[in-house]
Image (cartoon, rainbow, N blue to C red):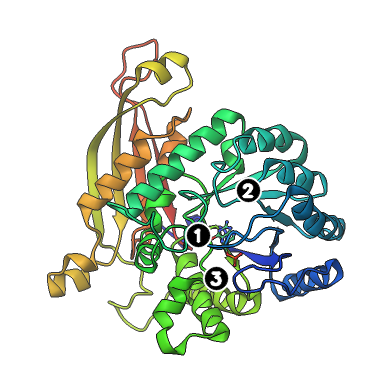
């Protein structure tokens, strides 16, 4: 495959945090004056923020709730002013009424860390607004008002449970009328999750990617970083650690990162992009170097999945067989040299991830399924390209035929 035929993943967006609150966990009280808040947002945009996330009620563990009136009094003038300047605004709220007022004031994203669980009206409200205002919904994973004692941080497998819970929330959002292309998912780092659980989630973003939605990560300045930094913890160190996380998750295909210090994350993402461009550039330094496109492949054929995709109602109701072939390009020399599973793609894990990507969330087209499978395959460490065929041997075609399939090839930039 030549480089021109590779699909470039979209670059990771930076969402700059603007807490217009007296008590947010890292910047509480600094931006309560609307003029100061607006000036701060402009500064964040100059530093590279693509979206400004405006919040008027702290969601940190132990914070006091505020009235809707107070929340809106804090944020609406700021949102109005920023959107009038053409700045893309997100509103960080748990409340449908505030979401509605914020969207009418110009917010383009509704960022609900409770994923619609705190306010029953949230999804319907956003659905009602989304057509007219093109509103997008960020759905966070949460188990209730954050508990400082972490009493709800028990998970059998945090990666699987967070991913399943977000899938369920996305289904509810779509059922309420929010179009799938308007949904973004967020694993909710720090919300009833320990530091170790947060790192597990970050290291397994491909499990969220299989759901087929863009993924936003909010690790900025959180306790998981402080615990990792230990004695060296201060705001500057947390911002540096946040920037490293931004780079790592960008490499894993995150759609966006929500950060307080935009400048350091913008620098980290620029370096990440330059590094990736370097890796794509062919070198004549000799065979065996990573920059030489590898010819090594892992190939999986005939993976059968029973699922409910198709244009016709009866296909959605009765289901049918789909057969998947997937070939991933990954340099296998290190795994072979050390006889180490950790240095290759574990094909059992690849199978599990593909099964999950194909079994859930019905779609009309096998093209969409193939895209989904390619995306999750590219989420595995070291995979540079993926070639995916989706067969639909029992497709409702009024003729005798052997098979029908689509094949796509995708690569990381
Ligand atoms: N974290 C906080 C607030 N809002 N929104 C999203 N989408 N994801 C997060 O992880 C998130 C959020 C809490 O942090 P803050 O008090 O620093 O804003």
Does 52 sit left or right of 148 as displayed?
right
Residue underneath mark 3: 220
The reply to whether residue 211 is in sight is no
Give how far apart the Cα atoms at labels 2 and 1 are: 23 Å
**What is the secondary structure assignment of the residue under circle 1?**
loop
Chain-order first, disc 2 or disc 3: 2
Residue underneath mark 1: 254
Chain-order first, disc 2 or disc 1: 2
Residue plotted at (63% across, 61% down): 58
Residue plotted at (48% across, 50% down): 141
Chain-order first, disc 3 or disc 1: 3
Foreground residue among 35 and 88: 35
**What is the secondary structure assignment of the residue under circle 3?**
loop
Residue plotted at (83% across, 69% down): 33
Foreground residue among 45 and 53: 53
Q: Position of residue 318 (x, y in %)?
A: 35, 16
Q: Position of residue 281 (x, y in %)?
A: 46, 74
Q: Quadrant of ligand 1?
A: bottom right
Q: Position of residue 24 (x, y in %)?
A: 63, 67
Q: Between tags 3 and 1, which lies in front?
A: 3
Give how far apart the Cα atoms at labels 3 and 1 are: 14 Å
**Which quadrant holds residue 45?**
bottom right
Q: Between tags 2 and 1, which lies in front?
A: 2
Foreground residue among 216 and 357: 216
Q: Between tags 2 and 3, which lies in front?
A: 2
Residue underneath mark 2: 94
Mark 2 touches mark 3? (CB < 8 Å): no
Furthest residue to the bottom? 232
Which label number is shown at residue 354?
none
The reply to whether residue 387 is in sight is yes
């Amino acid at each position: 495959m030549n480089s021109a035929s590779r699909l470039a993943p979209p670059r990771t967006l930076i969402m700059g945090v603007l807490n217009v609150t007296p008590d947010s966990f890292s910047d509480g009280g600094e931006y309560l004056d609307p003029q100061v808040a607006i000036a701060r947002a402009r500064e964040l945009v100059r530093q590279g923020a693509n979206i400004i996330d405006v919040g008027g009620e702290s969601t940190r563990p132990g914070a006091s709730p505020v009235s809707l009136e107070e929340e809106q009094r804090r944020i609406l003038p700021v949102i109005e002013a920023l959107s009038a300047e053409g700045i893309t605004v997100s509103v960080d709220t748990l409340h449908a009424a505030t979401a509605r007022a914020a969207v009418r004031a110009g917010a383009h994203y509704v960022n609900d860390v409770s994923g619609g669980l705190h306010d029953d009206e949230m999804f319907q409200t956003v659905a009602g607004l989304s057509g007219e205002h093109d509103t997008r919904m960020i759905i966070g994973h949460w188990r209730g008002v954050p508990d400082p004692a972490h009493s709800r941080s028990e998970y059998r497998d945090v990666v699987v449970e967070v991913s399943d819970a977000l899938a369920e929330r996305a289904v509810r959002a779509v059922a309420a009328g929010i179009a799938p292309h308007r949904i973004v998912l967020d694993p909710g780092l720090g919300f009833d999750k320990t530091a170790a659980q947060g790192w597990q989630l970050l290291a397994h973003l491909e499990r969220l990617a299989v759901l087929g939605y863009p993924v936003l990560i909010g690790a900025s300045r959180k306790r998981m970083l402080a615990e990792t930094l230990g004695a060296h913890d201060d705001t500057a160190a947390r911002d540096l650690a946040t920037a490293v996380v931004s780079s790592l998750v960008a490499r894993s295909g995150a759609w966006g990162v929500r950060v307080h210090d935009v400048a350091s994350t913008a620098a980290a993402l620029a370096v990440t992009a330059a590094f990736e461009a370097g890796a794509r550039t062919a070198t004549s330094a000799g065979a065996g170097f990573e920059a030489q496109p590898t010819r090594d492949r892992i190939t999986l054929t005939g993976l059968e999945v029973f699922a409910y995709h198709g244009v016709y109602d009866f296909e959605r109701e009765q289901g049918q067989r789909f057969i998947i072939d997937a070939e991933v390009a990954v340099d296998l020399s290190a795994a072979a040299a050390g006889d180490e599973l950790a240095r290759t793609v574990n094909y059992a894990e690849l199978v599990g991830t593909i099964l999950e990507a194909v079994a859930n969330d019905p779609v009309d087209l096998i093209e969409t399924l193939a895209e989904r499978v390619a995306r999750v395959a590219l989420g595995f460490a070291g995979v540079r390209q993926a070639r995916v065929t989706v067969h639909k041997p029992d497709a409702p075609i009024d003729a005798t035929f052997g098979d029908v399939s689509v094949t796509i090839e995708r690569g990381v930039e």
